[in-house]
Amino acid sequence: MDPPPLIDFSDDAVSSVTSHSYTDRHGTRIFDRYLSSSSSSSAAASSDDDDETHTHSSSSTTIKRLDYMIDFLDRKLSTSDDRNRNRRPASSLPEFVGRGGDITMFRPPVRAAVHPARPPSLEVRPHPLRETQVGCFLRAILCTEKQLWGGGENGVRVWNLKDLYSESGSEEDGTAPFKESVMGVSALMCLVGDEGSGSGLVWSGHRDGKVRCWKMMNQNQNQYGCLSDGFREALSWQAHRGPVLSLCISSHGDLWSGSEGGALKLWPWEALEKALSLTAEERPMAALIVERSYIDLRSQLSVNGFSSMLTSDIKNLLSDKSSAKVWSAGYLSFALWDARTRELLKVFNIDGQIENRVDMSLLPDFSLEDEVKMKIVTSSKKDKMQSSFGFFQRSRNAIMGAADAVRRVAARSGFGDDNRRTEALAITIDGMIWTGCANGLLVQWDAIGNRLQDFQHHSSAVQCLCTFGSRIWVGYVSGIVQVLDLEGNLLGGWVAHSSPVIKMTVGAGYVFTLANHGGIRGWNVTSPGPVDSILSSELSGKEFLYTRIESLKILTGTWNVGQGRASHDSLISWLGSAASDVGIVVVGLQEVEMGAGVLAMSAAKETVGLEGSSVGQWWLDLIGKTLDEGSTFERVGSRQLAGLLVSVWVRTNLKAFVGDVDAAAVPCGFGRAIGNKGAVGLRLRVYDRVMCFVNCHFAAHLEAVNRRNADFDHVYRTMTFSRPSYLSNATAAGASSAVQMLRSTNAMGMQTVEGMPELSEADMVIFLGDLNYRLDGISYDEARDFVSQRCFDWLKEKDQLRAEMEAGNVFQGMREAVIRFPPTYKFERHQAGLAGYDSGEKKRVPAWCDRILYRDNRSALASECSLECPVVSSILQYEACMDVTDSDHKPVRCIFSVDVARVDESIKRQEFGDIMGSNEKIKLILEKLRQIPETIVSTNNIIFQNQDVSILRITNRCGKQDAFYEIICEGQSTVKEDGQASDHLPRGSFGFPRWLEVMPATGVLKPDRIEEISVRHEDFQTLKEFVDGVPQNWWCEDMRDQEVILVVKVRGSLSTETKNHRIRVRHCYSAKTQPMDHKPNNTGQIQGNVLPRSDYQRLSNSLDVVDHLRNLHSP
């Protein structure tokens, strides 16, 4: 796309155009250079709605960019001013920073405008919040020539590839413009594209057992009920009783579908074509035509004596168009089929061992049982024998059913071989099959099912595979993507998403990856490569154009309630009075309930994934009432462990930007097993930045400093977040077992560096609670005297926590506001004022047990908020509520002022497109990488009679670069008596007719090498019609001469465009063939497979088809 004009702020430039202006939020009047006179004249010349929409979109984008630029300049000026005056913002409190923040584990995570450890990506759909995706998670993606399709739990959506750089629509913030089907469609399980059927079809398999066909439409095509501006559901039928787990289109255009229990069906292209060609009035018959046309391929398994595939779910189907085969895969076994004859060729396991056939005499003979049943009916002991037979029959069925269930569970859950199960299949251009396993193993197979090599580049489970040219892309459950060459060598890898990569597809020069959370990113097919560094540098330099700063306040409160209950007035004093202008409220309570029985019950609940209690719920309800929950605030998450409780409330107008809530609990008491001491935490995403709130209760007593330090270290290192128990049943459909296992341990999918704690990857961490650090080296009376005189500075010198932080022993690198309130422990209940300190027999020394500390993205105090340091906080208020007397502890609250830098993905995506389209270095590199080698093809005409074979030769004339070829069929025509072709009919996915075999149909041409392709005419004189899976009718095939157009598509290793050569193949039944064109041919009539040669055709001389082909009578 063309880059936008440069912004010129000079007075002359502004006055020389028809100016448009607006007033920004700072009150500054801005003139819009994007809306120049040319824009105005074009708008005046056309009143079309699309032009008006485009103008409005351009104006909106310009306003955003200018707004972000002004904010950027304001921040730079204000930061520079603060540095010159060497002062903090006026309203923030001074802070104390602990040592040890430079230790890797405690260092803030690396952030940048463009991630430094991976190639730049095109953000098609930014990471959506999980709470917004309930019931509509995306489960599959597919790229066709012009669209990117996404299928989810509640419908289908389509992105036009030409619009990927456009401004976001109103559907989802930051997402590229898309169209969506009506809601209510059953959850989608798989997608397969069909570019060869004329207008381009997409087939989808669904959880309800249906297969649906989607068709793109022109804007003026509204018949059949267009769903959403350009695509509609063209056909649907009930394919299976269970969910449709996999789909593929064979090299002959037939649709194959797999389901649970080994169900495998083939839907002939002829039936699909007939159903799709029906008129609107005939459409009700379409589903019936297709439903009854299927071929039950599983019947061949039992007929031929194979047993392992009978109960194995068909998780993957793969069409090998190079050798005209189809692979069907369960978790632990494969079946290999002939795509033309539809016969089963081979069944083998994941080790490549051929499956032994079962002695059919050992299998139940159901026909014999029926005969026995008839004899019993005619016997004199009819009733008794029937009853006896029925009992044994039912028992037998029950036992076989149970055994079948056990086998299916074993296949899914993997008794013994779980980590070896197959998760993904892909085929490379050289005809090799690659499978990915749950243990991270990649296995290379040849076309006939021989296991060749194993590769292990990562330990996580493989989730998906994708191939393009000379590269293989692998997506893992860890969120990592790796790129390999055709020999299996690792070229590069990076963390592509913060959750498992579940699907990948290729189109428009990008490899698109779908994450388990629903986000979609596009990676340049040349990555890793030289384009990445240039694009990263350019995008980083334009950071100020797409950086948006959000500001909010967070109120955090901690209180050890001492197993008591608070009054409503106490909560108003503690929280209600401070929550008027905050966006997020975090509350941590300790000792909500204690006692041996409570601890034992809590431990028992934790072992079965349960948590919470009636007392904890009472506190949540009371706090919610104080915060006006339901109207002003909404509770987004909570977690309880015995007496520990943490909960988060979010203001309703901020709720759309807060989500992905995960919870964690770490017991520290009695051998790290009981929750009398420990921590509970909540992790959530705020403006796409990760924040963690951890409520702690550490070891008590003055002398237990080391135990408290050890408690912190244990909590920090081992806290692992997962989805809250009340959301655990909302598992997204279609996720693999590996993904579901990951969800149970890490729901947000935060991928940390190996060995690094999850808390270290958060942008902001706040610790609050009864940390139990005391005052050292001071008596009770001395402490009381200093408190009464409010001499807190001297008391702080005795504070154990401050001393340990200064030594770098605990809370390394974390910050706390300077304390200006009295010690919060220990008080007599219901005694107001400082006179309420413990006056009993023990006379515990007053101490600041209740504390709130934090860490943000800053590595230095002076860091400003930016995409490199996206979360910057300061403390506005840090105080204890001394008037609350319901416990022996005083509640403490802290108000944070937080600036969050977020990316406007819509603007960044447009900048991405501008750079790709205008940067000369990138264009030059891509042009070199995508060069197509000079290639020649031996002929453009082939004539068959009977079962002939012709050899097609393709030569790579380039001495340095590999060429990649693919042969497809544009369709079949009937040859009239005058020799001209008519009735052109394309087949599904550019499939070959059943009478033609081309092998290999794909391959790699090495430099200066010749590839020989066998083009064979197969004897196929009869057709079978299947009704409900059983052949019903046979008849002779049409005896008229047939003609197909083969297209040899040649590309370079990374080129997205191809150079094509067309070959006419004619099948003649008569002894004498008709001439191929009207030109006189000196060789006379052509017999058999003698070819009229046009000599060699140089494909690299022109992008067009050779001139003389224009004169051929092509359909």
Image (cartoon, rainbow, N blue to C red):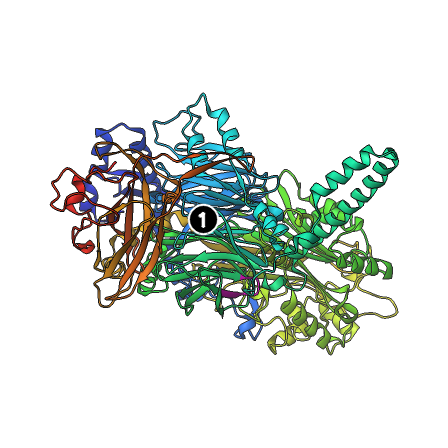
Residue 442 falls within the magenta-colored stretch: yes
- Where residue 56 sits: x, y (%)? 33, 36
- Where residue 136 sits: x, y (%)? 55, 42
* In this picture, residue 910 sits left or right of residue 33: right
Q: State the residue in front, 304 or 232.
A: 304
Amino acid type, residue under disc 1 in the picture? Ala
The stretch in magenta equals 437-443
Indicate the quadrant containing the C terminus: top left, top right, bottom left or bottom right: top left
- Where residue 918 sits: x, y (%)? 25, 53
User: Can residue 979 be seen from the camera position used here?
Assistant: yes
Residue 218 falls within the magenta-colored stretch: no
Q: How many marks?
A: 1
Residue found farthest to the top: 281
User: Can residue 183 be seen from the camera position used here?
Assistant: no
- Where residue 1007 sits: x, y (%)? 25, 66
Q: Is residue 91 above or below residue 86?
A: above
Q: Which quadrant holds residue 395?
A: top right
- Residue on which disc 1 sits: 339
Q: State the residue in front, 527 or 1100.
A: 1100
Q: State the residue in front, 471 or 862.
A: 471
Residue, x 75% and y 53% (percent of image)?
610
Neighbourhood count class around disc 1 (C-alpha, 10 Å): few under 14, some 14–19, many 20 upward: many
Please tell me whether mark 1 sits on a helix, a strand or a loop.
Answer: loop
